[in-house]
């Protein structure tokens, strides 16, 4: 068998595609899934594809379960995995004012604390081995803020900052820490975001109108790319001798980050309000801009 790698939340989206791709490339894959049904579906896809992997159920937001499963992984991999693909995350899309504290805490728990917890559990073995790799699947939302995604962006940005610090701290021990930041694509996270938009706003009818428009745009699956390109970036990050610190996947991920970094706030904010309909229906020019940026047309 090849080098061992743990892929979390591998029962959907980028994690699922990455787990199958890595198993097909010869890695010894331990894939965790958040539901029993998802784990069984992953096992079936692996059998149908003629690849071998070990799939187990794990809720990454449960500290005790994480310690138990990672303890099993250490036994299965002769001390600990060579690599971790940190894919576990949740999504929600509502205005900041319209987001409950419970929803906000759920985002922070899954997207920040759970990812840090899993990394903390695998790092000791990597240090002892003198090397390893942690690849975290993140989002362009960590660097480019869109209306209605404030809390989601906050959770992704917090995780990105932690992983930047971890990258510097782990480097002297031979451990490479990498971020893969993707744009809009067809995964379970998009479905979660659409579900959170279903309830009308308790704040303003304008927000309710935006929720309906954004949900319709995100539900237009043919306009969104699949998870395969991001899974390929994860694979590249694991096989590269000197992986980049950050891989951006998708034109929208690259353009959004540059827009936030380079455009004055007065310009960027106006474009975002127009694209999401917060300033009324977007003009033809604004729709063209969305298309050029690779964004769904809201």
Image (cartoon, rainbow, N blue to C red):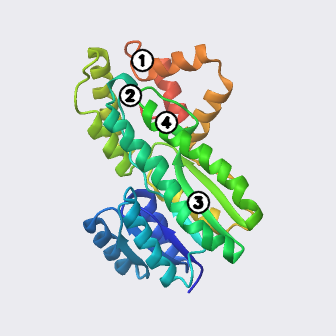
Q: Nearer the viewer, mark 1 or mark 3?
A: 3
In the structure shown, which secondary structural element does the residue marked by tag 4 occupy? helix
To which residue does mark 1 refer?
282
Residue 50's x, y, as percent?
Answer: 41, 82
Q: Earlier in the sequence, mark 1 or mark 3?
A: 3
To which residue does mark 2 refer?
298
What's the residue at 28%, 15% (across, down)?
A: 204
Q: Nearer the viewer, mark 2 or mark 4?
A: 4
Cα–Cα span, label 2 and label 1: 8 Å
Q: Please name whichever residue, 105 or 151, is drawn nearer the observer in this view of the structure.
A: 105
Most distant residue in the right direction: 172
Residue 2 left/right relative to 55? right
Cα–Cα span, label 4 and label 3: 19 Å
Q: Earlier in the sequence, mark 2 or mark 1?
A: 1
Cα–Cα span, label 1 and label 3: 38 Å
Residue 64's x, y, as percent?
Answer: 38, 64
In the structure shown, which secondary structural element does the residue marked by tag 3 occupy? strand
Residue 128, placed above or below residue 186: below
To which residue does mark 3 refer?
135
Residue 244 makes an appearance in the image: no
Residue 134's x, y, as percent?
Answer: 60, 62
Residue 126's x, y, as percent?
Answer: 64, 71
At label 1, counting other C-alpha atoms closer than 10 Å, the crowd grade (few under 14, some 14-19, many 20 or more) is: some
Indicate the quadrant where residue 46 lies. bottom left
Cα–Cα span, label 4 and label 1: 23 Å
Q: Are marks 3 and 2 in contact (CB under 8 Å)?
A: no
Q: Earlier in the sequence, mark 2 or mark 4?
A: 4
Cα–Cα span, label 2 and label 4: 18 Å
Q: Earlier in the sequence, mark 4 or mark 1?
A: 4
To which residue does mark 4 refer?
153
Q: Earlier in the sequence, mark 4 or mark 3?
A: 3
Indicate the quadrant where residue 11 lies. bottom left
């Amino acid at each position: 068998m090849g080098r061992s790698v743990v892929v979390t939340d591998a029962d959907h989206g980028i994690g699922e595609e990455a787990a199958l791709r890595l198993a097909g490339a010869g890695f010894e894959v331990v894939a965790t899934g958040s539901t029993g049904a998802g784990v069984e579906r992953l096992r079936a896809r692996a059998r149908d594809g003629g690849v071998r992997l070990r799939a187990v159920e794990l809720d990454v937001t449960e500290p005790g379960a994480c310690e138990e499963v990672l303890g099993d992984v250490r036994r299965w991999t002769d001390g600990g995995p060579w690599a971790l693909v940190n894919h576990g995350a949740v999504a929600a899309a509502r205005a900041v004012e319209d987001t409950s504290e419970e929803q906000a805490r759920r985002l922070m728990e899954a997207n920040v604390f759970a990812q840090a917890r899993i990394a903390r559990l695998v790092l000791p073995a990597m240090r002892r081995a003198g090397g390893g790799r942690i690849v975290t699947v993140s989002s362009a939302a960590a660097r480019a803020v869109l209306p209605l995604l404030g809390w989601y962006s906050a959770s992704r940005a917090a995780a990105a900052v932690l992983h930047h610090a971890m990258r510097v701290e782990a480097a002297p021990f031979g451990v490479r820490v990498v971020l893969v930041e993707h744009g809009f694509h067809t995964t379970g996270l998009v479905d979660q975001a659409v579900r959170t938009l279903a309830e009308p706003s308790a704040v303003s009818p304008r927000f309710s109108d935006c929720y309906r428009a954004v949900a319709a745009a995100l539900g237009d699956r043919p306009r969104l790319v699949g998870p395969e390109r991001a899974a390929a970036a994860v694979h590249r990050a694991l096989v590269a001798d000197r992986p980049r610190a950050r891989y951006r996947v998708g034109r929208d991920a690259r353009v959004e980050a540059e827009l936030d970094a380079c455009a004055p706030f007065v310009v960027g904010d106006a474009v975002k309000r127009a694209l999401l309909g917060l300033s009324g229906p977007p003009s033809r020019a604004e729709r063209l801009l969305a298309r050029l940026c690779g964004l769904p047309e809201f």
